[in-house]
Amino acid sequence: MNTPQAHLVDDDEAIRDALSWLLKSRGIPSSCYASAEEFLAIWNPALSGCVVLDMRMTGMTGLDCFEQLQARNSSLPVIFLTGHGDVPLAVSTLKKGAFDFFEKPLNDNDLATRIAEAIALNSNQREQNASQDSVKRCLDSLTNRERQIMDLVLLGKLNKIIADELNISMRTVEVHRANLFDKMRVKTAVELANLLKLAR
């Protein structure tokens, strides 16, 4: 997976250099792009971190780029850099899901802090998604009978009751239950219930 970093998209080289230097001094890795087109050309779903996007650029604007990222279901938080006249526009992008916006001239410390927060948020979301995928794979490995037993276990039913309801021996229930717990990598019904909450 790619290193989480700030993807700095601005057509002003001086601003790119200044931001890059600022983040380096804070120990935050970054990559620079001179246009929205350049960033979108390298974008892929595995990219992690956040995007710092200038609202007004020659060629494709930051807003166009943001809409493109949303159309691609990008999970990267976006922080906009705006000129004074763009504040109403920036506020409307927050409503559309942008992470934050900063008006130029920038307050370096505040911006660096928000970039760090955006990267941390993205990392947490990725970990959570990976956990959910892992639980779904475990669920997919269950047989129909194991699923039936799982549903009854989650209702708090004892093996004897499950055996009666499914018209099978208690020993069979025990075997299926052991297989089910093994596949789901849990030791108790409570652990199983908590794991399934995560998958939802």
Image (spheres, grey):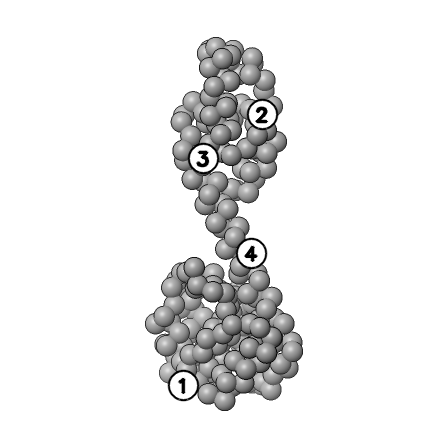
| Label 1 sits on residue | 58
Of 87 and 144, the residue lying toward us: 144
Image point 46% across, 82% down: which residue? Answer: 10
Secondary structure at numbered mark 1: loop
| Label 3 sits on residue | 139
How far apart are the alpha carbons under marks 3 and 4? Answer: 23 Å
Q: Amino acid at mark 2?
A: Leu
Image point 46% across, 32% down: which residue? Answer: 183
Q: Amino acid at mark 1?
A: Thr
Measured along the vertical axis of the image, is residue 36 above or below residue 46?
A: below
- Work out whether residue 103 can be spotted: no
| Label 4 sits on residue | 124
Pair 3/2: label in front: 3
Q: Earlier in the sequence, mark 3 or mark 4?
A: 4
How far apart are the alpha carbons under marks 1 and 4? Answer: 34 Å
Label 3 packing within 10 angstroms: few (<14), some (14-19), many (20+): some
Secondary structure at numbered mark 3: helix
Q: Earlier in the sequence, mark 2 or mark 1?
A: 1
Image point 61% across, 71% down: which residue? Answer: 114
Asked if the residues shown at circle 2 and circle 1 are in contact, with their CB atoms under 8 angstroms apart, the answer is no
For residue 155, the mark is 2
Pair 2/4: label in front: 4
Q: Amino acid at mark 4?
A: Asn
Based on the displayed image, in which of its 4 quarters is residue 73 positioned? bottom left
Q: Earlier in the sequence, mark 2 or mark 4?
A: 4
Measured along the vertical axis of the image, is residue 121 above or below residue 90?
A: above
How far apart are the alpha carbons under marks 1 and 3? Answer: 49 Å
Q: Is residue 61 left or right of residue 164?
A: left
How far apart are the alpha carbons under marks 2 and 4? Answer: 31 Å
Task: Residue 7 in the image: state x and y as whole percent.
Answer: 47, 73
Task: Residue 200 in the image: state x and y as whole percent.
Answer: 52, 42
Q: Earlier in the sequence, mark 1 or mark 3?
A: 1
